[in-house]
Image: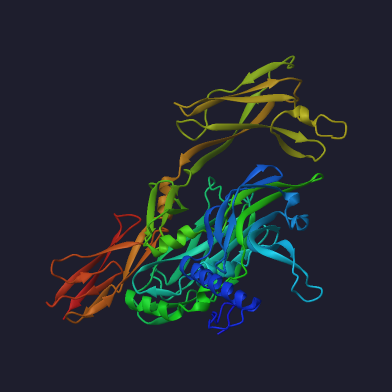
Amino acid sequence: MNNANLFPFERNRYFYGKLLTVRDFEVEQRYHSGKRALLNRLVHGAGVVCGLGVTASDESTLMIESGMALDYQGREIVLPEALFRKLQMLEGQETLSGKKDAYLCLTYAEEDVEPVNATGSQAGDQRQFDLTREGYRLFLTSEAPDYRTLLEAAGRENVSVLYQSEDLILVLSVPADLCAGEEFQAQVLVVKNEKTPPVQFSLEGENTFVESDNGRVLLSYRESQEEKRCVYTVDFPLRARALTDVDSQLFPSGCELNVELGSHHYKNYLNLEAGVRLCRDQEACRRRRRERDDLDRHLRGRDLPIYLAKLELIHSAGGVFVGAVTSLPFQQTMTGERDAQTGGAGELTVTTSVRSLEYWQKPDVKAVYQPSTGGLHLDFGIPSPEQYDYAVAHGTVDLTMPGGIRVNSRVFSEEIAHGLGAGAVDVRLSVEFVDSEKGETALLCGNSEVFKSKSLKIAPPWVEAAAVVYPERGTMRIGLWLHDTVEGNLVRVHYFAQKPERDTSRILSQRRVSLKVTPEFSRLSCRGKLQFQAEVVGSEDKSVTWSVKEENSGVIDRNGLYQAPELPGTYEITAVAGADESVSASAFVIVE
């Protein structure tokens, strides 16, 4: 087998009288370095071993810490001391013109050093080098990584790019082998910019092997305002159904993707190639993974660089500058892989997501810990701001004008009821007048001086209106200040009053939680099994708690699978809604 210049391994066979040439010594070196590189890649993986963090020293200079990494061919890359590099000094800086983002990459490199005269060489080859120095190559690129290759090289499976634009990239990955009845995680890699609006997305489609109330899978995420990371992973905990030896697709009939970025809304229907195998138990799952765990799987991505940093760029007349730096954006580190092999001991990776609750619901948090990966996911439920309804009233008041000179005079109404009852109300007033230009009645709201212009023929009266409200009595008085003479004996004032009220009762009536259990009545033989379904309406929380009312009347698991007892009888099955414990529904089983 010949794969990536590694195989087959050949070493020198020594014997007395063997003539050793340059080729023999090269074989000797290649054998040992190739073996070491292969073990590095297969046993340790690829990524940063220590150091190599990147920060912005100033707006045009990057500082790279000293450190060591293993590349995807198992070769050691060492930076013996910290480096300071201006963008203009780095390879690839000429490709950054007009680009928003760039990546600082690290790869293995070597060069021949110490030139010498080779007296025994053929003509023209007298100039040779005495040593080959192992080193590194630092360069900038504006091209985004091949996310599928990058994640597959890190051990992810069923990798699919869901969405890709200048401001946001979403990449989904799902395990290919699952254990029936156990929890697993679908992961979405989020890559965005520092100035990208808060990310909100959902992925939904029909599914046959994931536990759900309606036969569909919904992956929904809303980024909090406090989220400052530009590259991170969102984990969605799911649970496989108790099925065995089943091959299926995550979304066999396709799925709907919705993305919101500020005012930008995107919707698309996708067909994802995400094949999943449900195994009967952990041993069957491990056996299937071993069958697929071949050498090519571990040697993927041999040409991938180590992405040391994601740079957000600022362009000006003076050149290109660094706006923000995300060090090791794709977590190409050795720590995570070592922890996975040692049962999760080591650094803890914490991810978060936020759910929106109704304002009367209590805040909550759900935590999911994955020992195999050392990951802790916290799902926060945050109540939305309280909503209000408004009671509104409208009416008119006729104010009688005083006799004589009316300039700078004031008139007031009697105390009148505004119609909204006791309590604080907001009153807005407008004065009725006749618009001579249009020949119709109009209402003046605000200062009439705004409309005094030679280009306009509107002549509203020069008055100001105000109101005094008496909250305890539910009444008010309206007054006018006449800045100029007003024609006629009456001025009609329109009032618009509104009173804020909590709409708890209205929303609760519209979104009242209800629960239905099916089948409602059924017959079953002794020790027989029956699957119950619960439909929750009026809440995003579809969970229920199952129980059997009578003692010794069979058992029901948390998924609604009921097993009848050995004794005949009529038994009541009860489901209680997780969103509201006061809401329950029952079904009855006749065991014969």
Residue found at the far top of this picture: 404
Query: Which quadrant: the N terminus?
Result: bottom right
Residue found at the far front of this picture: 17
Q: Position of residue 390 (x, y in %)?
A: 51, 41
Going by the image, does 59 lie left or right of 366?
right
User: What is the number of callouts on the image?
Assistant: 0
Residue 454 vertical position relative to residue 114 in the rendered view, above or below: above
| Residue at 69% from the left image edge and 63% from the top image edge | 111
Q: Position of residue 509 (x, y in %)?
A: 40, 53
Whether residue 565 can be seen here? yes
Going by the image, does 538 lie left or right of 562?
right
Residue 333 vertical position relative to residue 479 in the rendered view, above or below: below
Whether residue 159 can be seen here? no
| Residue at 88% from the left image edge and 31% from the top image edge | 454
**Front-lying residue, 401 or 320:** 320
Q: How is the image coloured?
A: rainbow
**Front-lying residue, 431 or 357:** 357
| Residue at 54% from the left image edge and 76% from the top image edge | 273
When asked about the image quadrant of residue 521, the answer is: bottom left
Query: Which quadrant: the C terminus?
Result: bottom left
**Front-lying residue, 268 or 236:** 236
**Front-lying residue, 141 or 8:** 8
Going by the image, does 449 lie left or right of 251?
right
Q: Position of residue 176 (x, y in %)?
A: 46, 74
Q: Position of residue 532 (x, y in %)?
A: 30, 72
When asked about the image quadrant of residue 589, the answer is: bottom left
